[in-house]
Amino acid sequence: MSDDGEFRAAADAAYEAMLDRLGEQSPRPRLAPTRRAAELLGDPQRAYPIIHVTGTNGKTSTSRIAESILRAMGLRTGLFSSPHLQRFNERIMIDGEPISDEALARNWDDIQPYLSMVDDELVAADEVRLTFFEVLTVLAFACFADAPVDVAVIEVGMGGEWDSTNVGDGQVAVFTPISLDHTKRLGSTVAEIARTKSGIVKPAASVVTAAQPPEAMAELERAAQLCEAPLSAQPAAFDVTASAVAVGGQLISVRGLAATYADLFLPLYGAHQAQNAAVAIAAVETFVGGGERPLTRDVLEEGLAGATSPGRLQLVGTEPTILVDAAHNPAGALTLAAALPSFFDFDEFAFVVGILRDKDAKGIVDALAPLAARIHVTQSHSERAEPFDELAEHIQDWTHETVASFDDLGDAIEAARDWAVQSPRRAIVVTGSITLIGEAMTLGDDRGWKAGS
């Protein structure tokens, strides 16, 4: 076996070992075990400054845009995000690229003795050993210190206060829009969820937030006041001032904290991505100059032009057009429904939908149904996926339309393609869960859905 093959096998084995732990959808509301593991490793999360990002929707896109701008400034960056779409390495990015199999495997081997020590201590105390996400967080912090990076953009896994990423202290705490999601874990109201997420605000940090519902903003303001952290909130402190559809994305103008930046090309679709870009720009302005030093146009042009957001209104097929979008809650589905007619010139959409059991399926479907010429219901391979036949029955009851059901995602998409090729003004949208999107992207690569592939 080649070195590359050996490293690939070692990286895959590390992932399999992590999967043997309590899954990331069952997080423990605790920080002590992650903090203990980090301490044994010499606190790698203190080796670089951190921009810490939480929220309900837009976390990953905002994180990726901010990282791209920082990289355009000549900084060596780390980016930690979840979940991955196609391969585990995507979660730990070094300088804009998924971590190499070699670096991942090497760091995994390095942290093993320390993870075992903490596991033993937890078991002795009759507690659950380190979970998947706790171990993943420690691994990411170690990888960034090993690289080394100049700055790490860290996306919260779930919530904020007790999320394992919170053992790192963000110099900038960033909040994307907050709405209802993970209510069994985070709280049943927007205020409760915002209170949990506000836990990432630390003393001497700065806070940057997207526009929020009043009850969420009140919680963020409270946390900022307690930590004596300056707070910059949209729209008063910064905002999108203009956006226009452009080939391959949009032209946006942003009033930042330190300057106004006009007519910047953003290769992402949807008004929500313009909003994410504004938050990312304000976060970077805060990080590099306390919000008082303008970013250069060259840096912003390069940073935004290089920004990607896989699985977010992404084109994965042509002739016919196939889009994937990781909308997995009602707010995300409403955002998707608003973006489709604004950024794409199609008369009819077929939605290929698969949703996880713990999500608000009716809220998602209600948002998408007005645009749907047809709905193909399927499921991903996730253990949490709602069975396709049960979901199809529910959707038929909710929409009073006949829906088609498929036990295989590939079959669902191929049937939609057969329908879409009958008219140039038809398109397909695959959505409903992140796991479904990842599988669709892999299918697109394997089957050559893009023209010329």
Image (spheres, rainbow, N blue to C red):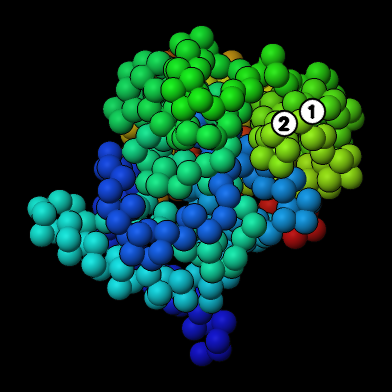
| Residue 266 position by quadrant | top right
Q: Is residue 304 above or below residue 425?
A: below
Q: Position of residue 3 (x, y in %)?
A: 55, 87
Q: Amino acid at mark 2?
A: Gly
| Residue topped by disc 1 | 258
Q: Position of residue 148 (x, y in %)?
A: 60, 65
Q: Could you tell me which residue is drawn at 34 percent across and 38 percent down?
A: 162
| Residue topped by disc 2 | 291
Which residue appears farthest toward the bottom when viewing the image?
A: 1
Q: Position of residue 41 (x, y in %)?
A: 38, 65
Which quarter of the rendering shows the C terminus? bottom right
Using residue 238 as the reference point, say whether residue 113 is left or right of it: left
Q: Position of residue 291 (x, y in %)?
A: 72, 31
Packing grade of label 2 (10 A; few <14, some 14-19, many >=20) is many
Element class at badge 1: loop
Q: Nearer the viewer, residue 18 or 226?
A: 226
Q: Nearer the viewer, residue 310 or 278?
A: 278
Element class at badge 2: loop
* Mark 2 in CB contact with mark 1 (< 8 angstroms): yes
Q: Amino acid at mark 1?
A: Ala
Using residue 120 as the reference point, say whether residue 309 is left or right of it: right
Q: Could you tell me which residue is drawn at 22 percent across and 62 percent down?
A: 119
Q: Is residue 218 above or below residue 346?
A: above
Residue 84 appears in the figure: yes
Residue 397 appears in the figure: no
